[in-house]
Amino acid sequence: MATTKPQALAAPAAADFVGRAPAGGDAGRVLRLLPSPAFSLWMHAASLQVVPTPKDLRTEEAPAWELVPLLSTQSHEGGLAGIAQMASKTGEVNLTKHVAVRARTGWIPAPPNVEVTAFGAKEQGYVRVFDVPQGKLYLDAWTRPYQHAGGISFRHDRVGYHLFLRSCMTALRSYIEPEDLEALASGLERLATLARGGSRMHLDRNRIDDLDARVQFLASNPLSSPSKAA
Amino acid sequence: MSGMQVNSPTGPGTLQIGTVMSSYLAAMLTWDAGTVRSHPALVNLGPFQVGTEAAQQFQLSGITRATMASYGEGATVIEQEIEVAKGDASSARWALAFKYTDELRYRSPAMRAGAIVNGIFTVAQKTLITNIASLSSSLTGTLGTSGAAFTHDLFMAGKAALEDASVPGPVMCILGNKQFSDWQIDLEGRGGLTQWSAAAAQMQQFMGGSIYKGTYDGIDVFAFPDAPTANAGADYLGMMVGAGCLGFTEEAIPPSDLANVIAASGPLMIEGDREATAGTDTVVGTYRHGVVVIEAARGVPLLSRAS
């Protein structure tokens, strides 16, 4: 019952103190995980992977395999990959060198402004932050923790992540066209060869077929057509 | 994480720890096989110079990659450009604090400063290997496929990639726990030469909490759960690196005049705080260090499923 008028307070009798139920422990509401640093995702023309298209995204004409970047996670913690700690009271880290070091070796930041969907909903960006007892936990938007009596499990949104990888591939190709897939193909081929000749008792036929299919997909020159990302 | 344990002093108080513990720390930072710090594949870029900025610069040159050519008498030798590169390693403050009340200290043997100092030392080691491992995503030329189990083939492909690139040894391999257990399972079903090799038998040994799992074909294998992940947590991104691929630097800042130092061993300093008004003690460990990729072509990331 909302009212804007201040109400006159009647002095309660001693017996009127009823208290309230305690709020209870917040153990269930506090995410019991250790903190992790903020991070950004980076991509590189020589860091690609061939992944199967998730079932939900597969249509008749879409290929079963796709060429997407293998993203690099760069922690924004001082002391890693050229990140210096600023000599200041704020404890801020200086990311200038980190960006320079990354750029010098051909890394490009994953596009910050593409549409991110995770678990069927639109996200502000690819990083989500959680409050945990000792600080903050940064996770990517496609990983979601579930806390239950036995511990914490994570669920992953493969479809949303795959869509993001597609956008990254489009962005990467607008910067630099990955021209040589030979290194990637030869790596997979080497694996297939080893799998074929190496294990005599435990020959995993599916796995070899899988690798062969990827090599074959790379041989079909997947870069000849523009990226499929919307 | 580390295999070795420090004997906790039995007496109360911190004076004894101050004298005994620092010598233990100095020894353990360099000797313990459970840490990657002393592994020869990692380049110790050395301590920071006093008064320089917070980055350690290193220079690389490719002089020895050149070859001589045959020239006729009197012919002018064509000069070659020297391939040079420069890198920076920045150090930063990594720290951990434990606070406990007087009663907890009195009732619980775990709350003795000695036990906490030992724990902080282990955590410092773990922090270094976690940071070293996090560099795997800065290397390119990944082997392996997303969602698939780690196999012996993947290990051999990594080794072949380093051999083909003439990467100098010794070589170390840092994996996620799941990658290592998948590899163990694959090795179990192997036939032929692999089945009867001593190295395969060594990999099958249960090593428990130790990060060092043994040596396979001259490659030292480390595995631990905090290895970096890829593909939104679906995969582990381990790596195999030769000498000169990765480096680290450490910085020892002398303790403050006002400090209550429990142990100071170079970059690792452990201090105590006594807050009499609250009746609490705090033990703070600070390990100043930084890690960096020196030459990315000397390593190869190994991708496989994380769960």
Image: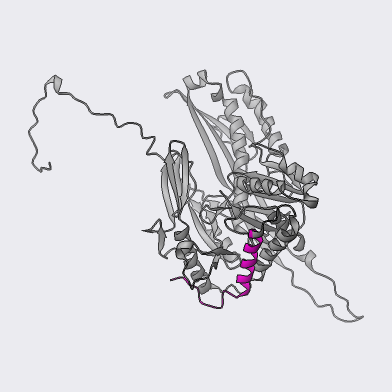
Q: Is residue A133 magenta?
A: no
Magenta residues, start to end: A206-230
Is residue B42 visible in this depiction of the protein?
no
**Residue A188: x percent and y percent?**
66, 64
Within the image, what quadrant is residue B198 found in?
top right
Within the image, what quadrant is residue A51 found in?
bottom right
> Residue placed at 59% from the left, 37% from the top?
B123
Compared with A145, B300 (above or below) is below
Compared with B105, B174 (above or below) is below
Is residue B138 visible in this depiction of the protein?
yes
Q: In which quarter of the image is the N terminus of chain B?
A: top right
**Residue A163: x percent and y percent?**
46, 64
**Residue A216: x percent and y percent?**
63, 71
Image side of residue A195 versus residue A59, left or right: right
Image side of residue B152 versus residue A22, left or right: right
> Residue placed at 51% from the left, 76% from the top?
A226
Q: In the depicted view, which residue is nearer to us: A93 or B298?
A: B298
Q: Does the magenta stretch include residue A219?
A: yes
Image side of residue A196 versus residue B98, left or right: right
Q: How is the image coloured?
A: one colour
**Residue B240: x percent and y percent?**
69, 54
- The number of numbered badges drawn on the structure is 0
Q: In the depicted view, which residue is nearer to us: B100 or A86?
A: B100
> Residue placed at 59% from the left, 72% from the top?
A178
> Residue placed at 71% from the left, 48% from the top?
B189
